[in-house]
Amino acid sequence: MSKEQSFYLKKIKRNKINIIFAQILITIIFFLLWQILADKKIINPFIFSSPKKIMETIFSLYQNYNLFSHIWTTLYETIIAFGLGITLGFTIAIILYECKTIAKIIDPFLTMLNSLPKVALGPIIIIWAGANMKSIIVMALLINLILSIITIYNGFLNTDAYKIKLLKSFGASKLQILTKVVIPASYSTIISSLKINISMSLIGVIMGEFLVSKKGIGYLIIYGTQVFNLHIVMSGIIILILISFLLYELIDKLEKKLLKEK
């Protein structure tokens, strides 16, 4: 390895370390400032809580309210909704790509369904699926599915037309074109869809838990609101932020692995 290459790699590594350090520093400053403002009563600690109170509340939830059971419930519902959404979305996107007539027929319906506020369907979903985990998963699925279909399908449409023509000139079948060109060329779009899907799934699950759940982070937030304990509400929000971050990091690791293999 030349000196220039070594210097370049060190520069990249140093830049990554600086970014991580800056992110950690911003987080620490934010929580310190929040705590100071609450201690000095510049902000109302009852309404806005404080990092110290949130830590105490999370510990109390762990001791008295089986916190990990609530976290696991939300994670389980999110993973199920995410898995169903991305599987159905990918499959339907392939069908639309291969059947242009069907795509033209249902395109306006996809647009209408995507713009429909899914929370408005909450009462209907509860009646259809019951006031249980099924209705929560269905709501999350409705939120993430249409967006996944549209995102992946548009990724397929943006595949380089010259590459497709080249394979056709060599007599490649539709399946070969799909698996060798279209899908690999859409890796970045598919990963972007995964990132959107996981966040939409979590949003849908929390919305569902607000309506019908007796367990989960959404339930804890609603419970905290009902008893006017905003420390529980803020603790639930912080836990959701951490869950969202961890799920995003998992997708990010998958993206790097797929793009590296590509």
Image (cartoon, grey):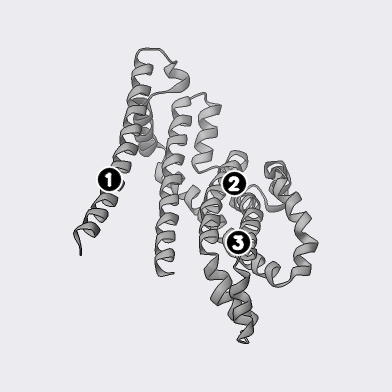
Q: CA distance from mark 1 to mark 2?
A: 35 Å
Q: State the residue position of label 3.
A: 155
**Between residues 104 and 131, which one lies in front from this camera angle?**
104
Residue 11 spot, x, y in % from top left: 26, 50
What residue lies at 42% left-to-right and 23% top-to-bottom? 49
Seen in the image, is 223 located left or right of residue 53?
right
Specify which label sits upstream in the sequence, 1 or 2: 1
Q: Residue at x 44, y 60 (%)?
A: 255
Based on the displayed image, in which of its 4 quarters is residue 37 positioned? Answer: top left
Residue depicted at 48% across the width and 20% down the height = 47
Q: Which residue is mark 1?
A: 17
Tell me the element at label 1. helix
Query: For the residue marked with disc 2, what is the amino acid?
Result: Gly
Label whose residue precedes the other's in the sequence (3 or 1): 1
The three-letter amino acid code for the residue at tag 3 is Gly
Q: Is residue 38 above or below residue 128?
A: above
Q: Is residue 46 above or below residue 16?
A: above
Secondary structure found at label 2 = helix
128 sits to left or right of 197: right
* Closer-to-camera residue (208/249): 249
What residue is shown with label 2?
Answer: 204
* Vertical placement of residue 129 versus 22, above or below: below
Q: CA distance from mark 3 to mark 2?
A: 24 Å
Checking the image for residue 42, the label placed there is none
Residue 66 x %, y %: 41, 42
Give the mark nearest the N terminus, 3 or 2. 3
Mark 3 to mark 1: distance in Å? 33 Å
Dots 3, 1 in contact, CB < 8 A: no
For the image, the number of numbered tags is 3
Label 3: how many Cα within 10 Å (few below 14, some 14–19, many 20+): many
